[in-house]
């Protein structure tokens, strides 16, 4: 499976994306915070023969643009609608992991025609009622990486540090996908101001759920704190056309922790929506 790489020059933002370019219904895959579209490569190989799978780097991440902005779900969703327009795609199955799940839900709730179906992977709709960023401009500090010795002086140093802070192998690979070499050393491909803004402008989004008119797959990893039982039940009961799944592997990277278990659930969802 050949994965094509390109840059979409949209109004106000450049979005880098990977594209199988295949025939079939499009699937748009949105990564989580600190991630890249690279996290979907195995997914692209799995489904790329039957579907056209597209995996962009969201704004502030990877090779995409990183302007000063809110980096909230509304902006991510607007970028994805514009990307689909630029590619001549009227509708897609939209799959979002973690932060990407919020963006995917926003796209499906507010740009109805763009999402024929939606998969929200290990992302709770819970959070503060009022975003911290609405009370003032966030500082350009990523709370996760602010104490990392960036830039790393060597790839070995980077690998050792990322290994120490990663609880699982998928988590380690997730961050390694964003490692890049510069003249100064090895740094990360996500912008601290983008991460800080995304966190500061985040608030609960249960209000989106009743507006989801397409079929929805809601999936969480059982045994971690990303989607508590109460939040999972509330989301499942609020989304009009929802099929809920759990994977037994507790890794937050639910599409990577146990790939075959995840794919069995995703295949079931595709069969339910007739795709």
Image (cartoon, rainbow, N blue to C red):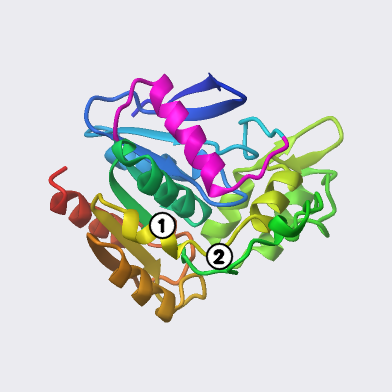
Crowd tier of the residue under label 2, counting other residues whose Cα lies within 10 Å: few below 14, some 14–19, many 20 or above: some
| The quarter of the displayed image where residue 58 is located | top right
Q: Which residue is mark 1?
A: 208
The magenta span reads: 68-91
Pointer 2: what residue?
168
Which of the labelled discs sits on residue 48, or is there none? none
- Callout 1: SS: helix
Name the residue at 39% across, 21% down: 87
Which one is in front, 161 or 191?
A: 191
Q: Residue at x 16, y 42 (%)?
A: 275
- Indicate the quadrant containing the N terminus: top left, top right, bottom left or bottom right: top left
Sequence-wise, which precedes: disc 1 or disc 2? Answer: 2
* Crowd around label 1: few <14 · some 14–19 · many ≥20 (10 Å): some
Q: Is residue 265 above or below residue 150?
A: below
Please indicate, yes or no, whether residue 3 appears anywhere in the rendered image.
no
Left or right: 180 with respect to 32?
right
Residue 26 is one of the magenta-drawn residues: no
């Amino acid at each position: 499976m050949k994965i094509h790489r390109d840059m979409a020059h949209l109004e106000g933002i450049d979005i880098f994306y990977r594209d199988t370019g295949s025939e079939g219904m499009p699937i748009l895959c949105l990564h989580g915070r600190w991630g890249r579209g690279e996290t979907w490569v195995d997914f692209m190989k799995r489904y790329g023969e039957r579907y056209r799978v597209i995996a962009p780097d969201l704004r502030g991440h990877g090779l995409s643009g990183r302007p000063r902005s809110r980096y909230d779900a509304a902006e991510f969703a607007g970028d994805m609608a514009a990307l689909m327009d630029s590619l001549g795609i009227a509708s897609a199955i939209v799959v979002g992991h973690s932060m990407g799940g919020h963006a995917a839900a926003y796209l499906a709730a507010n740009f109805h025609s763009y999402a024929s179906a939606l998969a929200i992977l290990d992302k709770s709709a819970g959070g503060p009622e009022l975003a911290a960023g609405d009370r003032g401009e966030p500082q350009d500090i990523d709370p996760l990486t602010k104490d990392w010795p960036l830039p790393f002086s060597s790839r070995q140093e980077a690998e050792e540090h990322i290994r120490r802070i990663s609880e699982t192998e998928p988590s380690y690979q997730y961050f390694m996908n964003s490692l890049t070499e510069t003249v100064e050393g090895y740094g990360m491909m996500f912008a601290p101001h983008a991460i800080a803004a995304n966190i500061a402008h985040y608030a609960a989004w249960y209000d989106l759920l009743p507006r989801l008119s397409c079929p929805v797959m809601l999936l969480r990893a059982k045994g971690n704190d990303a989607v508590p039982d109460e939040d999972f039940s509330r989301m499942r009961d609020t989304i009009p056309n929802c099929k809920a799944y759990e994977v037994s592997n507790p890794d937050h990277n639910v599409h990577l922790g146990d790939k075959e278990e995840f794919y069995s659930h995703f295949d079931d969802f595709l069969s339910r929506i007739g795709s």
